Image (cartoon, grey):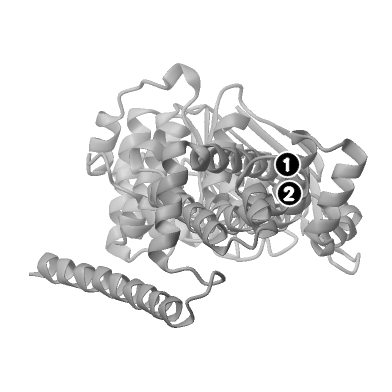
């Protein structure tokens, strides 16, 4: 009975999403049909363009390059940001010393970081990825700092009494407590990073979705711009569904079992 | 042999004032001996235990711990909620015991042998049993218990005391238990160390000659009356 009800609820939910998307599609198609303008192409024109780009391989090259940059910048930002966040969460002195730096970096527009990185370190891949990572590091650090401050000292004491080696302490005591904060940093991180990667590509790379959008912007080719954007949004949704959500479920499975 | 020789311990308040917590506290616990540390609330029992556990090293005096492993059962079970019951016990084990068979211990303590049981699914009494299992599993040279039976109903507490004694009898080790419950101390201990009001110092040490199994209500009453002030 309850599983049936659950199935019905799921189906209703899925149907709502499909309906909502269909309405959006309808609105778009309707507007395009009324306006008949190059500046708002019909959905089928956009999908035809995407199909064409997919067949000739262009789409995969640019999507792939952007995705690689997103992944590299994300990994670097998470690693460095977490290390900084944990250090700041544990040491009051370090926090007092470096908090102003964090605030400064948090408020520095990504565009400034990108432009300066290109000027100082050249128009290359390292500057590009480094600049994107740098714009995300303070966010990760602040989130993980909060998590580190929230660590339960009684469990740390327990681990100390039972002489947990450092690796075991980190893996079984500290990281599980930081997990929700990692999840939060990951979520906001991926969303932020892929948008900034497009800017980096627009300003100084010769491939990637950002570069393509810039190229087609010069021709005012809205069909291509929408096509590439939609393709990339689809990729990021897939990443969310295939990577982020299963990881979250796996890490929080103990939470769902209440006594 | 655990040799505790605390001269004094004080805490510093946020304003910098010194707040004495312990005076002279000296006693020993021999291997295979069960000692209870008791006294009025706030007298520094738990502080003493923290010093012995090495969680606080800021005090005057010295503490010599027996060579070998240390285990503790805290007031709260302090289990890792994101690890299964069995993993909680295993994670506390040193390398050489990593593959130890926990079944006899779990059976003795009446812990269900379900593999995918998480601490969140346990009652407080059951979580305390797991905390006991974790402490005994590593075959400690010194076992420290900090009021392990508070906030349980009388029947559950009594059952757990019996269980504690049966695992301890099977694997005797130097044990020090902090409790404010004098009857509990009189029932379990070989020796009772009584602390004064804060700042706690040792007022009295009572050795109990009657074997644990032979202590009836009258014996326990007699021991408790010795511990009462001016008694």
The CA distance from mark 2 to mark 1 is: 7 Å
Q: Position of residue A23 (x, y in %)?
A: 34, 78
Q: Nearer the viewer, residue B159 or B111?
A: B111
Q: Which mark is residue A205?
A: 1
Q: How crowded is mark 1: few (under 14 residues within 10 Å), some or many (20 or more)?
A: some
Chain assignment, label 1? A
Residue that extends furthest to the bottom in the rendered view of this protein = A34
- The chain that hosts pointer 2 is A
Asked whether the viewer can see residue A192, the reply is yes
The C terminus of chain B: image quadrant: bottom right
- Give the quadrant of the N terminus of chain B: top right
Where residue B29 appears, as percent x and y from the top left, is 57, 34
Element class at badge 1: loop
Nearest the eye: B88 or A5: A5
Disc 2 vs disc 1: which is toward the camera? 1
- Report x, y in % for residue B120: 36, 56
Res A200 label: 2
User: Could you tell me if the residues under marks 2 and 1 are in contact, i.e. CB atoms within 8 Å?
Assistant: yes
Q: Which residue lies furthest to the left in this view?
A: A1
Residue displayed at 89% across by 60% down: A100
Locate residue A171, reporting x and y percent.
Answer: 54, 37
């Amino acid at each position: 009975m309850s599983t049936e009800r659950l199935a019905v609820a799921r189906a209703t939910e899925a149907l709502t999403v499909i309906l909502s998307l269909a309405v959006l599609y309808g609105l778009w198609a309707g507007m395009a049909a009324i306006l008949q303008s190059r500046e708002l192409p019909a959905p089928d024109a956009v999908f035809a363009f995407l199909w064409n780009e997919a067949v000739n391989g262009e789409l995969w090259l640019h999507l792939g390059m952007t995705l690689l940059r997103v992944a590299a910048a994300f990994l670097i930002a998470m690693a460095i940001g977490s290390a900084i966040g944990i250090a700041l969460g544990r040491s009051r002195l370090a926090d007092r010393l470096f908090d102003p730096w964090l605030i400064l970096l948090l408020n520095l527009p990504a565009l400034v970081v990108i432009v300066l990185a290109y000027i100082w370190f050249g128009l290359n891949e390292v500057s590009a990825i480094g600049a994107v990572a740098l714009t995300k590091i303070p966010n990760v650090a602040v989130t993980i700092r909060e998590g580190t401050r929230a660590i339960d000292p009684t469990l740390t004491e327990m681990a100390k009494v039972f002489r947990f080696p450092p690796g075991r302490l980190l893996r079984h005591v500290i990281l599980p407590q930081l997990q929700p904060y990692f999840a939060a940093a990951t979520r906001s991180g991926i969303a932020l990073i892929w948008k900034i990667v497009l800017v980096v590509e627009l300003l100084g790379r010769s491939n990637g979705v950002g570069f393509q959008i810039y190229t087609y912007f010069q021709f005012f080719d809205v069909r291509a711009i929408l096509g590439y954007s939609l393709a990339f949004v689809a990729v990021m949704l897939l990443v969310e569904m295939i990577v982020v959500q299963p990881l979250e479920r796996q890490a929080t499975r103990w939470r769902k079992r209440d006594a | 042999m655990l040799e505790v020789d605390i001269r004094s311990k004080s805490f510093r308040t946020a304003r910098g004032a010194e707040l004495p917590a312990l005076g002279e506290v000296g006693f020993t616990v021999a291997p295979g001996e069960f000692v209870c540390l008791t006294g009025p609330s706030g007298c520094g029992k738990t502080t003493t235990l923290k010093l012995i556990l090495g969680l606080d090293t800021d005090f005057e005096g010295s503490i010599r711990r027996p060579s070998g492993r240390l285990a503790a059962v805290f007031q709260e079970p302090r289990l890792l909620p994101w690890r299964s019951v069995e993993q909680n016990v295993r994670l506390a084990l040193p390398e050489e015991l990593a593959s130890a068979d926990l079944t006899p211990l779990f059976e003795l303590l009446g812990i269900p042998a379900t593999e995918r049981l998480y601490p969140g699914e346990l009652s407080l009494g059951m979580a305390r049993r797991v905390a006991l299992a974790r402490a005994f599993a590593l075959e400690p040279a010194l076992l420290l218990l900090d009021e392990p039976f508070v906030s349980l109903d009388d029947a559950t507490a009594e059952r757990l005391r019996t269980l504690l004694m049966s695992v301890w009898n099977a694997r005797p080790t130097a044990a020090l238990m902090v409790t404010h419950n004098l009857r509990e101390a009189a029932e379990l201990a070989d020796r009772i160390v009584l602390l004064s009001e804060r700042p706690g110092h040792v007022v009295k040490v009572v050795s109990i000659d009657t074997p644990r199994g032979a202590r009836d209500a009258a014996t326990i009453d007699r021991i408790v009356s010795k511990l009462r002030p001016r008694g």
